């Protein structure tokens, strides 16, 4: 039986091992207040606490139960938008900086998770973007030339190599070598624990109802308390009601996911070596990865965010759509049933890059909004960009992620 509107990462995690954090109450002060307890918020809390800052993190519900706990679990070395497209919107130097920053963040994120010994099944897996038609192959070839022109390594695969690796009939493919996969919910919980070990204070069931500010400080108010701070970091992925004036910068979308029941061994042998994460040239693209040794996760079918009253119905429909589209790529998988079907909301900018940093209308604030990459690398990248912004030690590459770029 398919479980709809439930993330397998959260559903399968032992309930007795889920850490619990108190509701925020009272009045206090903190150098940094982080709003949002997903991967971005927890990675940022860890980064700031490790740098010696007094950090308070507030989550409206439970740590990791938002979009992070429903993510694909892909650590991508690319920002989710083509280099050639970025050249047109932010220029050649900006595109190069975005790709270099993303790749560096993917490597550093894996290194951090291993150094902290966070048990989240992180494993190296390269990614292959495949082109099914001659027109798609021509676009992929132009993308390779654009990347090489910007100094970005981009090996192009022929049809024979793709068939050998991922058992797909594709005209061409572009390889990214340094990606990885993980369980995003376990990674989020592990980062939260690591942040707390370094002195960060974490609170759940503590939605922020108001933020006021003057020239020197800001006051963050929950229903049961107040925190005075020099820095407010909003790591909710998209503007909440408190920051609706920033919604004009973004398009609001939903990605859909399906994870299969175990795939029989005979069928697995017909689906390639199962080492790579696969993206195709569909619009929107599909993301296909193996979970463990015998389950397939497929993501895609993105669309405008549905009304709440229709959400469950849409998830059922899109789960069926994804399984059908997966069977068109891998006919042998027809008949394997989905174990889970779920969705995750996200915001995206016109250029496709996230907005990381300050906005002139909100003093003392830093934001992390608009990661449409469908991976989790942006969470770690945001934590480093925000840390540099706070301590005024910016990297020139950070400007490509600014609101005004």
Image (cartoon, helix red, strand yellow):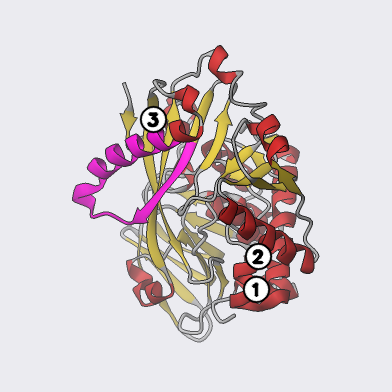
Q: Point out the tag, 2 or 3, that comes first from the N-terminus.
A: 2
Q: Which mark is residue 87?
A: 1
> Where in the figure is residue 269, as x and y percent of width and height?
61, 18
Residue where numbered disc 3 is placed: 340
Kindly give the residue lying farthest to the bottom in the view shown.
215
Whether label 2 touches label 1, CB < 8 Å:
yes
Q: Which element carries disc 1, helix, strand or loop?
A: helix
- In the rendered image, which quarter is residue 221 located in? bottom left
Using the numbered discs, state the Cα–Cα distance from disc 3 to disc 1 in whole angstroms. 38 Å
Residue where numbered disc 2 is placed: 83
Is residue 320 found inside the magenta-colored segment of the image? yes
Q: Which element carries disc 3, helix, strand or loop?
A: strand
> Where in the figure is residue 22, as x and y percent of width and height?
42, 44
Q: Magenta part mainly helix, strand or loop? A: helix
Start and end of the magenta stretch? 298-325
Looking at the picture, does residue 224 appear above or below residue 179?
below
Residue at 25% over, 41% down: 312
């Amino acid at each position: 039986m398919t479980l709809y509107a439930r993330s397998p990462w959260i559903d399968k995690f032992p309930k007795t091992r889920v850490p619990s954090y108190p509701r925020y109450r009272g009045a206090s002060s903190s150098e940094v207040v982080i709003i949002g307890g997903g991967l971005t918020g927890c990675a940022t809390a860890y980064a700031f606490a490790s740098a010696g800052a007094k950090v308070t993190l507030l989550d409206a519900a439970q740590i990791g139960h938002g979009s992070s706990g429903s993510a694909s679990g892909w650590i991508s070395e690319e920002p989710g938008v083509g280099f050639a497209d970025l050249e047109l919107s932010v220029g050649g130097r900006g595109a190069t900086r975005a790709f270099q920053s993303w790749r560096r963040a993917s490597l550093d994120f894996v290194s951090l998770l291993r150094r902290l010994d966070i048990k989240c099944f992180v494993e190296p897996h390269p990614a292959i973007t495949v082109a099914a038609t001659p027109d798609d192959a021509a676009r992929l070839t132009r993308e390779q030339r654009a990347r090489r022109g910007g100094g970005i390594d981009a090996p192009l695969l022929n049809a024979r190599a793709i068939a050998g690796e991922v058992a797909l009939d594709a005209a061409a493919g572009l390889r990214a070598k340094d990606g990885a996969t993980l369980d995003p919910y376990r990674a989020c919980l592990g980062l939260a624990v690591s942040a707390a070990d370094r002195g960060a204070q974490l609170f759940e069931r503590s939605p922020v109802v108001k933020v006021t500010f003057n020239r020197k400080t800001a006051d963050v108010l929950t229903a049961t308390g107040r925190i005075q701070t020099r820095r407010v970091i909003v790591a909710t992925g998209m503007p909440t009601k408190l920051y609706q004036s920033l919604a004009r910068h973004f398009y609001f979308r939903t990605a859909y996911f399906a994870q299969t029941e175990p795939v029989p061994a005979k069928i697995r042998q017909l689906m390639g070596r199962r080492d790579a994460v696969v993206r195709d040239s569909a619009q929107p693209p599909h993301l296909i990865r193996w979970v463990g040794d015998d389950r397939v996760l497929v993501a895609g079918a993105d669309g405008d965010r549905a009304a709440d009253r229709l959400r469950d119905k849409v998830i059922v429909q899109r789960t069926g759509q994804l399984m059908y589209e997966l069977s068109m790529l891998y006919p042998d998988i027809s008949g394997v049933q989905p174990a889970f079907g779920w969705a995750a909301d996200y915001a995206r900018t016109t250029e496709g890059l996230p907005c990381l940093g300050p906005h002139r209308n909100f003093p003392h604030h830093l934001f992390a909004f608009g990661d449409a990459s469908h991976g989790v690398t942006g969470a770690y990248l945001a934590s480093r960009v925000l840390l540099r912004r706070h301590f005024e030690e910016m990297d020139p590459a950070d400007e490509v992620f600014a609101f005004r770029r």
